[in-house]
Image (cartoon, helix red, strand yellow):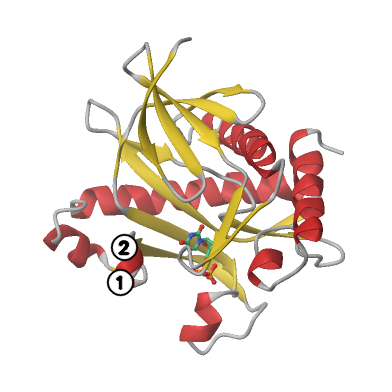
Amino acid sequence: MKVGAKIASGKTKNIYELDDPSLVLIEFRDDVTALDGRKRDFIAGKGAINAAITAKLMEVLNTSQTPTHFVKLEPPSAIIAKRLRMLPLEVVCRNIAAGHLVKRLPFKEGDLLDPPIVEFYLKDDERGDPMVNKRHMAALGLATPSEAEYMEEATLKANEVLKRFLASRELTLIDFKLEFGKLPDGSLIIGDELDPDCMRIRDSSTGRILDKDLYRRGSPLEEVLKAYLECKRRIVEGG
Ligand code: UDP
């Protein structure tokens, strides 16, 4: 397939047109960022790892009646996906308290959240990605109440599927972030990525961190790479 013009470039990914206008090529770069882009580095090989993990996890969702934009892996570091009109929202699902939740509310790190918590954030680096509720989203013209309801239900479903799949690899899903976009017929599906940049994943028996928290906490970049490689080995290769 012929790769066309660049449509968009984010903090860690580039998106290109393809000759089929209903598809895009999403290239995962080796950049790693935190603190809304204020901390930034490169980890050679990370793009290929994240493309492979996203491909596997989205394939799992696609085959579990939780549709995503994923079509196929384009090695070494890209995926082909359905072209979506993305909503400027981040939908976070939490099974165990961590990160912002324990800073903002009286939860302790490691508290079990059952049932899981779903939160919506506006994608807006300048405002520090503020949390929004269904009425904010409606007033801002971002999503109707029924679209917000659908995203919440789809996120909870994705959580059950991912939690079960990762548990089969001896991995615990602490929390994760999804983004949704619209197909030309107006239906909403999961877009963006699913990898250790946007999920907290721990080894189930030791609690060892296998995600971007290592980078956020200042671990050497080689250790971050080692953790991402282990994630890929266990998620993609099953070993
Ligand atoms: N997350 C993300 N992008 C963001 C904010 C959060 O991918 O801009 C992911 C993050 O990796 C974690 C989950 O969403 O898996 C919950 O993150 P939290 O709200 O605790 O914020 P953090 O402490 O990660 O900044």
| Label 1 Cα neighbours within 10 Å, binned few <14 / some 14-19 / many ≥20 | few
Can residue 196 be seen in the rendering of this structure?
Answer: yes
Please give left or right for residue 194 compared with residue 148 in the image.
right
Question: Residue 140: horizontal and vertical position, in percent?
Answer: 15, 60
Question: Residue 137: horizontal and vertical position, in percent?
Answer: 21, 60
At label 2, the amino acid type is Asp
Residues at circles 2 and 1 in contact by the CB criterion of under 8 Å: yes
From the viewer's perspective, is residue 33 above or below residue 47? Answer: below
Q: Which mark is residue 61?
A: none
Cβ(mark 1) to ligand 1 < 8 Å? no
Question: Residue 182: horizontal and vertical position, in percent?
Answer: 28, 35
Using the numbered discs, state the Cα–Cα distance from disc 2 to disc 1 in whole angstroms. 6 Å
Please give left or right for residue 136 compared with residue 180 in the image.
left
Please give left or right for residue 227 compared with residue 102 in the image.
right
| Label 2 Cα neighbours within 10 Å, binned few <14 / some 14-19 / many ≥20 | few
At label 1, the amino acid type is Arg
Q: Residue at x 57, y 72 (%)?
A: 113
- Is label 2 in a helix, a strand or a loop? loop
Q: Residue at x 76, y 52 (%)?
A: 225
Q: Which residue is mark 1?
A: 127
Q: Residue at x 52, y 47 (%)?
A: 12
Question: Residue 123: horizontal and vertical position, in percent?
Answer: 34, 59
Please give left or right for residue 193 compared with residue 229 in the image.
left
Q: Which mark is residue 124?
A: 2
Seen from the viewer's position, the closer of residues 238 and 158 is 238
